[in-house]
Amino acid sequence: MPVNEPTAMYRMLHAESIAVIGASEDRNKFGGRLIYNLIHHGFKGTLYPINPKRETIFDLKAYPNITALPSGPDVAAVAVPAKALSETLRGCAKMGVKVAIVITSQMAESGEEGAKLQDEAVAIAREAGMRILGPNCLGALNAQADVCLSPSVTMSVDKLPKGRVGVASQSGALQTAMFIRAFDAGVGFSSCITVGNQADLELSDGFEYLVDDPDTDAIFVYVEGIKDLERFRTAAQKARAANKPVVAVKAGRTEEGAAMANSHTASLTGSYDAFVALCESLGIVVTDQPDTAVLCADALARWGAPKAEGVAVFSGSGGAAALAADAIAESSFHASKLSGPAIDHLGEHLPHRKETAIIDFGGYRSPFVEDVMIESMETVADDPDTGALLMIMTPQPCMEQLAAAIRSIGTDKGVPALLCNKSGSLVDEQVNKDAKELGYPIYTSLDDCYRVIEALMAYKRILESAEGDIATEPATPEINAAARVLAPGLLTEPEAKGLLAAAGAPVTREQMAMSPDDAVAAAREIGFPVVMKGVARGLIHKSDAGAVKLNLADVAAVRSAFAEIEVAIAEAAPDAELAGCLVQEMATGGVAEAFIGASWDPQHGPAVLVGAGGVFVEVLKDVQMAAAPVSPKKARTMIEGLKLWPLFAGPRGRPKADVDALADIVHRVSVLAAHLGPQLGELDVNPVIVRAEGEGALCVDARAVWNAPQ
Ligand code: ADP
Ligand code: MG
């Protein structure tokens, strides 16, 4: 029981009285399934069917209207046509209903007219202090308490699968599809919540409920878009603090950002990448399919983090074992590297010495002896490097006995033990039945098994790393001062570099020059050779326009460069206001070029990127992204994660790049992004010239999109 006033989610999922408005005996209707599912799954409280045309529904007394009830129920489940919604909700409000679950669709999702009705519904609820789930949702259920407030056809299953996985989903239909797949696999739920259009209660309300729910050990959130970043973040942090693993799937992996090619950052990242980066910073495991995600959440609820990153595979088929070896080679885990007792045991039964745990029972000197197979699995499960065990059940002797052995390893030893049935109906009879009755999962897809193992290992890494990845420095007065002088729009190179310098990142020494004489004076002060660049607001690609002159060695070169840049700008950007010529130090001694970017979006907050290749970053698309701010240590891990990392590490006798210096700039840019928030829409630092180890790195170009304060 929550200590404070129960939340709306709590009241709904522990309702003691429910009115079903639009109730019917026809299970082809939403209202019919709503009331049937409640009765069918043994709702223990008081049920009020509301239907003006009926005396009784499923032997319960029916009422013509919610206002005709003897007293107001906790919850009203509403399945009425859109036109009748406002009137219905007024009745609910009048009766003091706490939560209205609105199944009704044709609301904001269908256009302007629906949006108006939805706004009206919210206004009615707000005024009465009533909360709304939906509209356009598929309700919610608390399997542990037998409260099935869902009109989904999948709820016609014999009994609600009870388990430890809680689900909060922005899609109703997907949730119920996932529900039945999980049911078939023997996975059970604590509570499942669909939030539909989130007109009032939203995904994070469900997420928070599950974090607090003592019946939930792991959480699956299905996200279409984050409505309130702070609430999502808070719920995720509470889940971490409570040691509840969270698995997330996000819809829409398309890169809408690519359309906005104002900056490299925008074209290199879509909102999906930003979501993944956010989840990583919050310790949420991301996977790509709802069906699989729920299996991952179930495994995490059951086993938590494995003791090691090795995986042992058993099969009666040499072919299956070989395929498993391939799959493991491509994964982030490895086949268990066995030691002492396990090696000795296998030595007794295999014709050759074996140290990695991919084991084919068919290859034993005496194949398929029940006790021996079971002993093998148990011995290998006890090996210190075995974090998980996978049995690929091809048609073979002793299938039921092996399945039972897997279950007991998974239950008694606490080692994740996955059973993948590749024998179809051969084992359907007993093993599949056992899975459901004993509440132990059985998988039919090897891909699912590998993803589940990936999720377990990801969670292990989350628990081990986490701390130390996030930068903790407070913002500096220098950053505030640099930000104060900027006007909204595209920032020029010196403006963007002003922000970088304020964050302590090394930038080229440089001066603006308004005349050739100015430029000569600046060059003398900076020291030859110099670089000159045209600066004009809106001139995005300076070198494409011929407005970058490198390696200018003397006064004559500076004078002619000034004249050429003036012409180049007049041609390339005739409408741009010319701010002048930037004279800057020529960076020398680079051994590698890099790109650093920062971005902000309302759903996922600030992010930082690092990429290899400098000017070629868009061609190479080799970038790593993380939620900002990151520590220098995390920045270094990002750089090491680049495909082109070997170029920084000193390939073929070339000097090593100063990776620590680059990591420090990534960290500083991330602090800048985190501190400036929505004002810094995008920032590109490209290139960063990285010198040899110990010699530093230098930001030679930058641009940014600056937003008005919000
Ligand atoms: P833009 O990206 O707008 O075309 P840059 O300022 O990045 O213009 O300049 C283009 C290229 O010139 C850079 O990628 C870099 O290789 C080189 N460059 C620019 N400034 C310097 C500098 N100060 N020192 C050395 N090389 C530079
Ligand atoms: Mg550039």
Image (cartoon, rainbow, N blue to C red):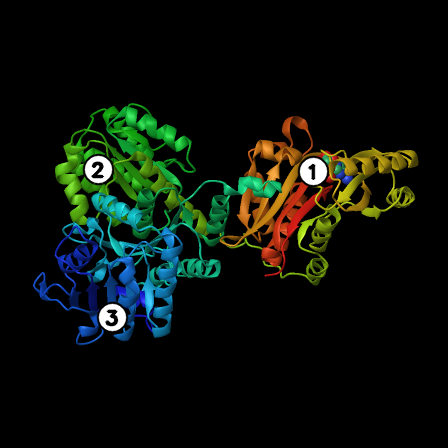
Can you see residue 588? no
Q: Position of residue 55 (x, y in %)?
A: 9, 66
Task: Identify the residue under disc 1.
Answer: 541
Residue at 70% over, 61% down:
484
Q: Nearer the viewer, mark 2 or mark 3?
A: 3
Marks 2 and 3 sit apart, C-alpha to C-alpha, by 53 Å
The location of residue 363, given as percent across then percent down, is 26, 24
Check whether the beta carbons of the residues at disc 1 and disc 3 lie within 8 A of each other: no
Q: Which mark is residue 446?
A: none
Closest to the observer: 131 or 439? 131
- Locate residue 344, reporting x and y percent: 31, 33
**Quadrant of residue 684 in the image?**
top right
Task: Indicate the amino acid at tag 1.
Answer: His
**Mark 2 lies on residue:** 374
Q: Nearer the viewer, residue 240 or 137?
A: 137
Q: Are marks 2 and 1 in contact (CB under 8 Å)?
A: no
Residue 224, x across and y down, in percent: 40, 49
Determine contact: label 2, label 3, CB under 8 Å: no
Which mark is drawn over residue 74?
A: 3
Instruction: Classify residue 56 by image quadrant.
Output: bottom left
From the viewer's side, name the closer residue of 248 and 332: 248
Q: Is residue 493 left or right of residue 11?
A: right
The residue sitting at 18% across, 29% down in the picture is 396
Residue reaching furthest to the left:
59
* Label 1 within 8 A of ligand 1 by Cβ: yes
Q: How many other residues sit within 10 Å of disc 2, few (<14), some (14-19) or many (≥20)? A: some
> What is the distance, in whole Å, between disc 1 and disc 3 at their CAs?
62 Å
Q: Secondary structure at mark 1?
A: loop
Give the answer, above or below, for where 588 lies relative to 193: above
For the point 64% across and 40% down, the residue is 595
Image quadrant of residue 696?
top right
